[in-house]
Image (spheres, rainbow, N blue to C red):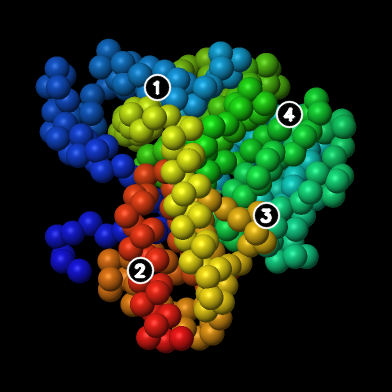
Amino acid sequence: MKSDQRLFNFSSGPATLPEPVLREAQRDLFMLPGVGMSVMEISHRSKAFDGILEDAEATLRDVAGIPDSHAVLFLQGGASLQFSMLPMNLLPPGQSADYVITGVWGQKAIAEAQKAGTVRVAGTTEPDGFRRVPRQDELQLDPAAAYVHVTTNNTIYGTQWPTMPLTGDVPLVVDASSDIFSAPMDVARFGVIYAGAQKNLGPSGVTLVVIRKDLLSRSSKALPTMLNYAVQAANGSRYNTPNTFGIYILGLVARWMQGEGGLEAIGRRNVRKAGTLYAEIDRTGFYRGHADRDARSLMNITFRLRDEALDEAFATDATREGLDGLKGHRSAGGLRASMYNAFPEAGVETLVQFMREFERTHG
Ligand SMILES: *Cc1c(COP(=O)(O)O)cnc(C)c1O
């Protein structure tokens, strides 16, 4: 590997950004055209930044089909702060919220919600080692719940809901940090969609929250101001200074998504990329996938070698070949290839070549 060459970055997040976005940001970093200052130096209340934020929101609404019924918020604190902010806003005293647990992030989400109010586990696949997600008939949903919380894609275990569960009139709230806008999404169906930007949307430090506007009326005035969705919405995500640079990059990524043909085209490419890798994992038995086939994630592909003692050597050798970040999460072990929207198809092909060579020399 040459030291001046970009690696294929399989990291789970922060993750690969589209090259044209990096190039444009680099070109304009010193001075935004027509502005005479860097995006990092302008006031978050300036005309120039008004334009950047409005453009980011409008482009995102266009490419992802976010309807007027939903507000778009650019917050901070990552998806992890949403674990607290959600129940603080949407879970009134005397009601309870349903959580479906399909991995570590769902466990963390419910642990925070417990501090804010009453919660129920409406389903879990922990007894199955989080290799799958529940079937609809396994869920025990409370028709009076304040909301149902689901993790759409389990970044660590490499599972993904093939379709969202039906929750009737109860708002469906999802942590979509690791698969947001990786395929067309019927946004109108959701009460809340939230995601840390650093996997599929931009740099870390911005959290996207898409929330059905009628739910904003649940936010109590007693909440800390910064943690109040209604205040954030009324102030256009600028109650205080937002992550201006992050919002700028997110806008560029949204424009890149449009240019790639939108979520339909991006979704097809994601199916192709993951399909290529799963086919190699399944080819001979030398590799073994972690997730059950019908719950396999298109974003985070988790696998091991049949001889687990070789996992480490695989990751080390791969890094030497310019394939970076393949070591699995510390709580799941094994290997993980994260391939979000911006991850190039050439990277998957290179990984498959490497896997064949590794099998030839170690099989
Ligand atoms: C990465 C991730 C998180 C944590 O995100 P932060 O922005 O670091 O707080 C939460 N949920 C899921 C599903 C994730 O993939």
Residue in the foreground of this view, choosing between 188 and 83 = 188
User: As shown in the figure, which amino acid type bears the numbered disc 4?
Assistant: Pro
Image vertical order of residue 163 relative to residue 220, above or below? below
Could you give the CA–CA distance between mark 4 and mark 1, rounded to whole angstroms? Answer: 25 Å
Contact (CB < 8 A) between labels 2 and 4?
no
Contact (CB < 8 A) between labels 4 and 1?
no
Instruction: Tell me the residue that label 2 is attached to.
Output: 353
Could you give the CA–CA distance between mark 4 and mark 3, rounded to whole angstroms? Answer: 25 Å
How packed is label 4: few (under 14 Cα within 10 Å), some, or many (20 or more)? Answer: many
Horizontal relation, residue 180 to residue 326: left or right: right
Frontmost of labels 2 and 1 is 2
Q: Residue at the location (22% across, 35% down)?
A: 25
User: As shown in the figure, which amino acid type bears the numbered disc 1?
Assistant: Thr
How packed is label 3: few (under 14 Cα within 10 Å), some, or many (20 or more)? Answer: few
**Where is residue 58 shown, x and y percent of the image?**
42, 18
Evaluate whether residue 48 shows in this view: yes
Q: Residue at the location (79% across, 49% down)?
A: 135
Image vertical order of residue 310 relative to residue 282, above or below? below
User: As shown in the figure, which amino acid type bears the numbered disc 3?
Assistant: Asp
Instruction: Tell me the residue that label 4 is attached to.
Output: 171
| Picture disc at residue 59 | 1
Image vertical order of residue 225 relative to residue 246, above or below? above
Horizontal relation, residue 182 to residue 159: left or right: left
- Of the numbered discs 2 and 1, the one sitting upstream in the chain is 1
How packed is label 1: few (under 14 Cα within 10 Å), some, or many (20 or more)? Answer: many
Could you give the CA–CA distance between mark 2 and mark 3, rounded to whole angstroms? Answer: 26 Å
For the N terminus, the quadrant is bottom left
Based on the displayed image, in which of its 4 quarters is residue 250 positioned? top left
Could you give the CA–CA distance between mark 2 and mark 1, rounded to whole angstroms? Answer: 37 Å
Could you give the CA–CA distance between mark 2 and mark 4, rounded to whole angstroms? Answer: 45 Å
Based on the displayed image, in which of its 4 quarters is residue 60 positioned? top left
Instruction: Tell me the residue that label 3 is attached to.
Output: 294
